[in-house]
Amino acid sequence: MIKVMFVCLGNICRSPMAEFILKDMVKRRGGSFEIASCATSSEEEGNAVYAPAAQMLAQHGISCAGKRAVKFSPADYQHYDYILCMERRNVRSLDRVTNGDPEGKIRRLLDFSDNPRDISDPWYTRDFQQAYDDILEGCEAFYDYLRREGKL
Ligand code: 4NP
């Protein structure tokens, strides 16, 4: 069982999109996973996925019903194998909470792709299509990495 935690700033746009895109991918392509998402901030705690992000998922037949924002907890660091951040800023925030990532679990999602980069925050850019495309690219690259490494 591969345990994956996605992380962004608010846990209402990017990391929930990543959570449900990877869950959908696993359903179609296979693998034994536990997948969740969380925030580095408590700003949106308890809130549902932001409507434009939920709509992007719905356009691809993916439901995120019932998801509520939660904040990263130190226990998550022990539980999850891969802690995948949307941007460098999230990595820096977690570094403080995890005392510098001693087990090397924290990565940026798009560092698995051929074009490593941050995923811009659609809360500010308003470009939910770009966020969806980037997250899909990252999830595919991550899934392919696991397969290459013989972890699936
Ligand atoms: P997310 O977007 O990190 O992709 O979920 C954000 C949502 C809300 C806020 C920041 C980012 N906020 O500050 O409320």
Image (tube, grey):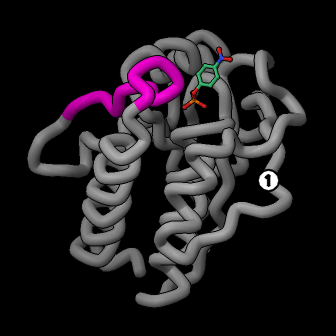
Which residues fall within the magenta stretch? 117-126
Above or below, comparing residue 52 to residue 96 in the picture: below
**Which picture quadrant has residue 4?**
bottom right
Describe the element under mark 1 as helix, strand or loop: loop
**On the picture, is 117 further left or further right than 92?**
left
Residue under label 1, please give it: 67
Give x and y (percent) for residue 106. 46, 35
In this view of the protein, which residue sits in the foreground, 132 or 11?
A: 132
Give x and y (percent) for residue 7. 57, 36
Quarter of the picture for ligand 1? top right
- Whether residue 77 is visible to the viewer of this picture, yes or no, is no
Q: Residue at x 39, y 51 (%)?
A: 132
| Magenta highlight on residue 120 | yes
Q: Residue at x 85, y 59 (%)?
A: 66
**On the picture, is 137 further left or further right than 10?**
left
Q: Residue at x 77, y 29 (%)?
A: 71
Give x and y (percent) for residue 36. 68, 54
Q: Main secondary structure of the magenta part?
A: loop
**On the picture, is 140 further left or further right than 124?**
left
In this view of the protein, which residue sits in the foreground, 85 or 3?
A: 85
In this view of the protein, which residue sits in the foreground, 126 or 49?
A: 126
Amino acid, disc 1? Lys
- Whether residue 130 is visible to the viewer of this picture, yes or no, is yes
Above or below, comparing residue 100 to residue 19 in the picture: above
Locate the N terminus and report the quarter of the image it occupies. bottom right
| Count of numbered circles on the image | 1
Give x and y (percent) for residue 117. 22, 31
Crowd rating for badge 1 (residues with CA inside 10 Å; few <14, some 14–19, many 20+): some
